[in-house]
Amino acid sequence: MTDIQPLLDVRDLSVVYESTGSAAVEAVKGVSFTLQRGEFVGLVGESGSGKSTLGFALTRLSKPPARISGGTILFDGRDVATVEGEELRVQRHGGFAMVLQSGMNALNPVRSIRNHFVDIFRAHGHVARADWEARAAELVGKVELPRQVLDRFPGELSGGMRQRVSICRAMLGDPDILLMDEPFAALDAFTRDDLNLELQANSARTQATTLFITHNIDEAIFLGDQVVVLDRRPGRVALVLDVELPRPRPLAVRETREFADYRGLIRRTFEELGVLRRGS
Ligand SMILES: Nc1ncnc2c1ncn2[C@@H]1O[C@H](COP(=O)(O)OP(=O)(O)OP(=O)(O)O)[C@@H](O)[C@H]1O
Ligand SMILES: [Mg+2]
């Protein structure tokens, strides 16, 4: 336990989809958890359990028909669940959150990395044009990419480099929280392992507060300071687990007894929820 005010304090949050002509769908129900500044949280749950809905609601990026139907989202102590219009725009402008979705594939193959960055600077008008180049160079330096990467095209970069570019891009708007929604779902196991190591190193360097959504239990434990397990739809929090494995974590940590204990706890939770068959 800590007495430091969390960066994000979600209490009893519910989200519904309300389309005209069809019954409302309760996608997230009564979710509570906290995110400390600099913390990495893995969010796991079966398909359809409401992970993306929750991620979007937290960062106030939900679009109709999604609607926050209850609860509070305290961001740095202020309730942002009910903020609308200009006030919300101002908060986002200050970089209250940013989505990095399928980061690897989100890069346009015919645009240079510099142009990808420029697009974000334009969208987030708070970096003066004269400072674009310096800011871009500073960010690529932070993730240990050479400055020349700005002149390259996505296809000329390795998977790890593309990931670093994607993270930079997400950080251009100065987000307080990085939301990663299944960024590695489409990748083979080896590439995924590599990128997990990369991401861990990046998180250590940048200290970005991260909400990482995945179906993969091992990935959530490997990367997370905390793992939040969602129940089947409507998503509620079934388990919050503090992962106390020392960092940096080698991939082989997954073979250890401690890791197996965390995995066992999450699997048993999923069995009790009926998401996994017992003994599977
Ligand atoms: N636009 C929409 N209108 C109505 N229902 C929706 C809409 N988008 C999502 N839902 C429903 O909300 C529930 C949660 O969806 P969500 O996309 O958050 O799940 P998820 O956990 O991210 O799943 P996945 O792991 O497959 O990405 C699902 O049952 C889905 O059918
Ligand atoms: Mg999803």
Image: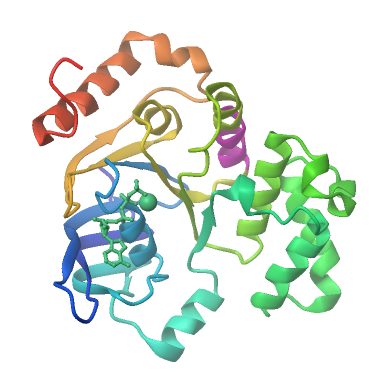
Q: Which residues are magenta?
A: 197-205
Main secondary structure of the magenta stretch: helix
Seen at 44% across and 22% down, the residue is 246
Q: Is residue 109 visible?
A: yes
The residue nearer to you, when weighing 139 against 15, is: 15
Which quarter of the image is occupied by the N terminus?
A: top left
Seen at 22% across and 81% down, the residue is 20
Image-based side of 162 in relation to 35, left or right: right
Seen at 12% across and 20% down, the residue is 278
Point out residue 157 in the picture as x, y percentages from the top left corner.
79, 39
Image-based side of 246 in relation to 171, left or right: left
The image shows residue 88, relative to residue 59, as above or below, that is below
Which quarter of the image is occupied by the C terminus?
A: top left
Seen at 34% across and 17% down, the residue is 259
Image-based side of 26 in relation to 147, left or right: left
The residue nearer to you, when weighing 275 against 33, is: 275
Point out residue 138 in the picture as x, y percentages from the top left corner.
78, 55
Q: Residue furthest bottom?
A: 86
Q: Is residue 32 magenta?
A: no
The residue nearer to you, when weighing 15 against 139, is: 15
Q: Is residue 5 visible?
A: no
Give the total of numbered labels: 0
What colour scheme was applied to this rendering of the protein? rainbow
Point out residue 274 in the picture as x, y percentages from the top left corner.
12, 33
The image shows residue 74, relative to residue 246, as above or below, that is below
Q: Residue furthest left?
A: 272
Image-based side of 207 in relation to 276, left or right: right
The image shows residue 60, relative to residue 3, as above or below, that is below
Point out residue 24 in the picture as x, y percentages from the top left corner.
16, 71
